[in-house]
Image (cartoon, rainbow, N blue to C red):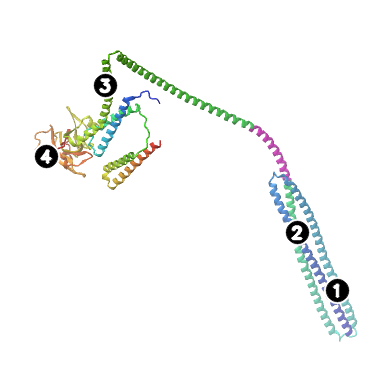
Amino acid sequence: MVESFNEIEKKLAKSFKAIREDISGIKESIDKINENFEETAEETGKEQKKIKEEQEDIKQEIKQLQEKAEKKHEREEIPEIEKLAKNITDLTEYISELKQETNYLKKQIFLFDKKSDEKSQVKNLIEFSELKQDISELKDIIENIKIPVQIDYSKDISELKENFEQVDSKFSELRKEIQKQIKNIKFPIQKDYSSDINELAKEIGEIKGSLISRKYLKRETGKIDEKFSEKISLLEKKQEQLEIATEKMARQPLVLSLKQEIKQLKEQAEQEAEKQNEEFSEIKAENKKLREEIEQQNSDLRNEISVLKGRLTRLYTSAPEERKKIIEDERVKEKTKENAYKIIKFLIILIPIVLISFVIYSNFLASKDFNYFYDIGSQADAKTSYLTPIARISDINKEVDINYRNITNNGLVYFDVPIPRGSNNITAEIMFKDNFPKKSKMLIGARNDTNWSYVPKEVYNETLFKNSTDKWLTTSTSFDLKDLYIKDGKLNVYISIPHLSRNATQNYTIPIDWINITVHKDGFKI
Amino acid sequence: MVLKFEIKGKPAEIINYLFQSLLVAYLILLLIEQIWAGSVSVYFNLNYLLILVILTGILDVFSEHKSIKNEKPTKKDYLFIILLGIAGFVIIKFKTEQLGWLSWLISIIAGILIILLSVLVLQGEENE
């Protein structure tokens, strides 16, 4: 029994060893598959890279073609496009081959997977069947053993059972591990491959799209070329028409410009002709004048000649004494003429001398009284009033033969007196109507400073004139010019009637008929 | 334009002479009047003289003139110009005395202007 158990144990060990060896073999085969897959992945990666590079090249070419296609007039590039299209078709064929290869690889991978699965399953099944056989053999052995030694080997059997269960559990664990490993191997390869396939499919789609666009472009370029050629033919026709038209048009402005030039030339010629006519008429007039002058001179000369002839005949015909007389007379006449011109010239020169000397004499030597008569109410006064400000005098009034103005509000009016240089004194005489109220007066003042300063002199008061109401009166006063301020040869004089500035007596306006100023200037005294 | 009326010979010479002398007299008297106001106008109305100057001037326009020869300006001319400038300076100074220091400035500038303009005119005539 012990031997049989030992044998069973040996057999189990053998079977386990075989299983392990099988598992290691499966592992190795899986590793190999992985290696193959890695190699195929590397190859596919390289191919993908190549395809990508080619795609990039194609893209660049497409770009270039698109750029070139935009230039519709460049028809020479079409062969290049055709070449590129050919390349693209080659590439598509190549891609389709690659696709087929990839499909083939996919299939192979799938078959590998399937085979590996089948192998493992078969091996497991074989192992199981072997184990089952072993177990069944063992069962048979055990059944055979049961009968002779029932009691003694129960423990051993339980131990064996336990051992078997342990082995079985280990075996199940191993199987799970193998399945896991297989799954782990399968999954990444399938995933990588699918993503690559997807990418490839995408890229192929893009290439197809580009090819379609290329074909479309080609078609479009063909259409454009056709249109272009049609347009060119149309343009050529139009060009011909335009050339004909431009020739006609070119002729028209030329003709027009020539016409304009002719017109301008005509105008210029007319203007020149007019000018020449004018000049000619002027010259004619000058000639006429000259002729007249010459004729006049000739007639004068003829007259002179006739006179001279007459003289000469007289001289020749007369006696020698008479001759002398005639010659002397003529000399005297000529001399008198010359003298007359000289005298006239002298007199002309004398004019400024006389004038200047008169002014000098009048200013420095002569004694004179200068009289300035200011007729208030006269026509001259009506034009520009002698008295200012005009607001303080009335309009011109008339009383029988007397024209006058009234000194009104404020009662202070001014006037200027021209003072010749070197004057000594001034006498102011005034004619006025006595319309003064009681205790009133009238003053005449002469300016004595640059500021408002006057030398006042009373020309009317109640004591000076008695019982003179409503009568025209004259009064006068005099000033020494040494004390007075004369500006620009003029002395400023005022007439002041103070009662007119008061409200109570402002209605007593004083009529003024005239003012007579006498300026006395002493002569030069040695 | 050709003038039909033209005074010639001795009468033209006399008219020219008269116009010049009257103009000079008027200008001198006007200058005196401007410097010493009233010293001329009180004794003599300058407007009458002005009328005479205008009339003789009009006659002078219609009378024959001797061609003027362009001569080079001499030292005398320049001296005369300087004297005129000084005279102008003095007159303007006298008339603008009330302005104070500004009177000096104005009169000096005016004197220089008179001299420079006169020189320019003289040299312009020379160039012609």
Point out the frontmost of discs 2 and 1.
2
- The chain to which mark 1 is attached is A
The reply to whether discs 4 and 2 touch (Cβ–Cβ < 8 Å) is no
Task: State the residue position of label 2.
Answer: A50
In magenta stretch: residue A226: yes
Query: Does A473 sit above or below residue A100?
Result: above
* Residue range of the region highlighted in magenta in the rendering: A219-246
Tag 4's secondary structure? loop
Q: Quadrant of residue B45?
A: top left
Name the spot of residue A27 as percent of width and height, x first: 81, 71
Of A248 and A254, which appears nearest the observer? Answer: A254
Query: Does A135 sit above or below residue A353?
Result: below
Tag 3's secondary structure? helix
The local crowd at label 4, few if under 14, some if 14 to 19, many if 20 or more residues have their Cα within 10 Å, is few
The numbered mark, 2 or 3, whose residue comes first in the sequence reads 2
Q: Residue B78, can we see it? A: yes
Looking at the rendered structure, the kind of residue marked 4 is Lys
Q: Would you say the magenta stretch is mainly helix, strand or loop? A: helix
Are the numbered discs 2 and 3 placed on the same chain, yes or no?
yes
The numbered mark, 4 or 1, whose residue comes first in the sequence reads 1
Are the numbered discs 2 and 1 placed on the same chain, yes or no?
yes
The numbered mark, 3 or 4, whose residue comes first in the sequence reads 3
- The chain to which mark 4 is attached is A
